[in-house]
Amino acid sequence: MKKLICAVALPVLVAVPCFGESGEGAYLAEVAKKCQKNYFPPNDPKTTSTVAGKVTCRIECDGNVKDVRVVEAAKYANTKDAGALSEAALKEAVQKAAPFAKPPAALHCPAQIEVSFDEHGDATVKHEKTIAHAKSEK
């Protein structure tokens, strides 16, 4: 089964999975956009890139977020506090972006999502059924 990707033109590209006419893709793109605008990671002292990582959270039916957890964060080998700083930046990006709009019915709120930030600070958002599908393909 081929996956479709919706792209939203921002100062940088934000890609999210498409799911028919439900408005789910547009909603996830807006979540990614808001998270990306609130992501201020510490710079990696060894490169010019920012810190990459993933956060999971639950979007409630009213758009508030709960259970924000860092599931992956780059660590600096040469600085004591950088790991904690990068994890804090990842969590704060989601927490400061909230509240979001009410999720569309297709997301079956509360909606479990994963927000990923790449080394350039670009955000992508996956919904739990996309995450589960990706894991089953491995």
Image: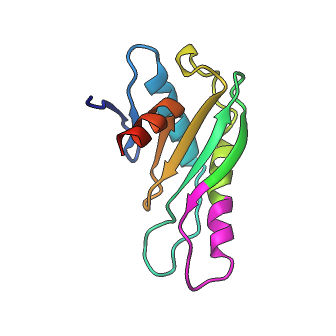
What's the coloring here? rainbow
Of 92 and 137, the residue lying toward us: 137
Q: Quadrant of the N terminus?
A: top left
Q: Position of residue 74 (x, y in %)?
A: 53, 67
| Residue name at image x 49 percent, y 66 percent | 50
Q: Is residue 72 rendered magenta in the image?
A: yes
| Residue name at image x 56 percent, y 72 percent | 75
Of 134 and 123, the residue lying toward us: 134
In the figure, is residue 62 to the left or right of 117?
right
Q: Is residue 48 rendered magenta in the image?
A: no
Outermost residue toward the left? Answer: 2
In the figure, is residue 74 to the left or right of 118?
right
Q: Quadrant of residue 7?
A: top left
| Residue name at image x 40 percent, y 46 percent | 11
Q: Quadrant of residue 18?
A: top left
Q: How many marks?
A: 0
Of 2 and 116, the residue lying toward us: 2
Outermost residue toward the bottom? Answer: 78
Q: Position of residue 16 (x, y in %)?
A: 41, 35
Q: Bounds of the magenta span?
A: 71-88
Q: Looking at the image, is 30 positioned above or below residue 135?
A: above
Q: Looking at the image, is 117 positioned above or below residue 24?
A: below
Of 138 and 85, the residue lying toward us: 138
